């Protein structure tokens, strides 16, 4: 499990470790739990990629397995993010003997520490590598060493690491959303009963317009992303997913299908008019 603030070289180190895994002929898996600066699959999801050969290292964009988180902001996703990641670690453990977990840059404050604590608790890594500038990871590392038995290695950020600007981050995310929702999209009409969480009776369905959803099969897997549209008094999901759709998961994001810009949406506010 690789942890560190934004721009500390986590993803680069993950790739180096996977390349070493391939060279040593180990069945490897990469779990990309960074829902914002995603490498595997679309943003707002945790993705798994099997890495068994050098060819597998060339393109990480297509996920072999996906779990929907529904948000890109750490404050809104601790439960979903931890469970999505832990579920994919379990999937990976069945086949891989080297699993590399890449994580979001949220490493401080109550949210970052709660997120990392519970990821440790459920994912049970053998080794944690914490990448730090100065001594910024020492509180987190102290905490992990106190509460867990995993080996925790602390290392300095490589001097050549190049920071990515907020604009570049946004543009990377927009591009990945655009790829995941590229036309031509199917426009499936959906019944109000297919959602998790369930919709309250009598909800004005237009309130769900532009909501991002995870398109799920019936085995817990996310097949891809979709966007809800309320038109002609009916609710439709626009998605690349062709078959196997069994249910739709609501997160806490709305997305504009022209610009792929996202805004935070509070489901409780949408469903019950409560501003919690
Ligand atoms: N060891 C290294 N030597 C040279 N350049 C590096 C090294 N590690 C990372 N970089 C460069 O620094 C930049 C940031 O690295 P990387 O994307 O791995 O960081 P990260 O911690 O995953 O960032 P994020 O918070 O965006 O996920 C990249 O352009 C990468 O090529
Ligand atoms: Mg990264």
Image (cartoon, rainbow, N blue to C red):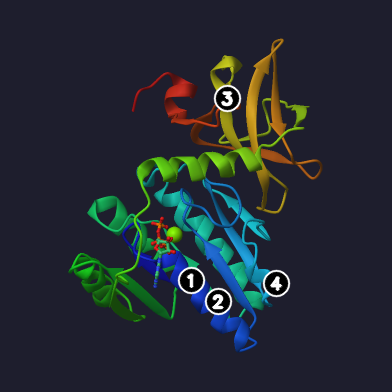
Q: Which residue occupies 40% across, 80% down?
A: 127
Tag nearer the camera, 1 or 4: 4
Tag nearer the camera, 3 or 1: 1
Q: Residue furthest bottom?
A: 24
Q: Which residue occupies 70% across, 54% down?
A: 219
- The image position of residue 256, as x and y in percent, is 55, 26
- Marks 2/3 in contact by CB < 8 Å: the verdict is no
Q: How many marks?
A: 4
Sequence order check, earlier mark of 3 and 1: 1
Quadrant position of ligand 1 = bottom left
Mark yes or no: residue 65 visible: yes
Query: Which residue carries the number 2 mark?
Result: 18
Query: Which residue carries the number 1 mark?
Result: 14
Residues at marks 3 and 1, CA–CA distance in whole angstroms: 34 Å
Which of the pair 135/57 is nearer the observer?
57
Q: Is residue 75 above or below residue 14?
A: above
**Mark 2 element type:** helix
Query: Which residue carries the number 3 mark?
Result: 210
Instruction: Specify the label residue 255 is tagged with.
Output: none
- Marks 1/2 in contact by CB < 8 Å: the verdict is yes
Left or right, residue 69 beside residue 185: left
Quadrant occupied by the C terminus = top left
Q: Residue furthest front?
A: 160
- The image position of residue 33, as x and y in percent, is 49, 58
- Marks 1/4 in contact by CB < 8 Å: the verdict is no
Q: Is residue 121 above or below residue 259?
A: below
Disc 1 within 8 angstroms of ligand 1 (CB): yes
Sequence order check, earlier mark of 1 and 4: 1
Query: Which residue carries the number 4 mark?
Result: 55
Q: Rate crowding at label 4 as few (under 14), some (14 to 19) or many (20 or more) other CA atoms within 10 Å.
A: few
Q: Rate crowding at label 2 as few (under 14), some (14 to 19) or many (20 or more) other CA atoms within 10 Å.
A: many
């Amino acid at each position: 499990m690789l942890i560190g603030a934004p721009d500390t070289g986590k993803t680069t180190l993950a790739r180096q470790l996977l390349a070493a895994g391939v060279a040593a002929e180990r069945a490897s898996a990469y779990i990309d739990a960074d829902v914002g600066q995603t490498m595997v699959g679309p943003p707002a999801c945790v993705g798994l990629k099997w890495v068994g050969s050098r060819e597998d290292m060339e393109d990480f964009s297509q996920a072999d397995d996906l779990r929907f988180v529904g948000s890109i902001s750490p404050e809104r996703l601790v439960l979903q993010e931890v469970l999505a990641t832990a579920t994919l670690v379990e999937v990976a453990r069945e086949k891989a003997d080297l699993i590399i977990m890449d994580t979001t840059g949220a490493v401080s404050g109550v949210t970052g520490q709660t997120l990392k604590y519970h990821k440790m608790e459920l994912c049970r890594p053998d080794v944690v590598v914490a990448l730090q500038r100065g001594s910024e990871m020492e509180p987190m590392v102290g905490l992990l060493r106190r509460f867990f038995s995993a080996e925790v290695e602390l290392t300095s950020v490589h001097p050549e690491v190049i920071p990515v600007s907020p604009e570049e981050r946004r543009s990377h995310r927009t591009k990945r959303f655009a790829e995941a929702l590229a036309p031509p999209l199917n426009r499936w009409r959906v019944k109000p009963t297919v959602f998790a969480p369930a919709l309250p009776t009598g909800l004005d369905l237009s309130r769900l317009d532009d909501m991002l959803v995870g398109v799920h099969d019936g085995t817990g897997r996310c097949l891809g992303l979709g966007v809800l549209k309320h038109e002609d008094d009916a609710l439709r999901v626009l998605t690349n997913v062709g078959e196997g759709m069994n249910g739709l998961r609501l997160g806490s994001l709305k997305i504009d299908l022209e610009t792929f810009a996202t805004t935070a949406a509070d489901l409780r506010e949408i469903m019950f008019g409560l501003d919690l």
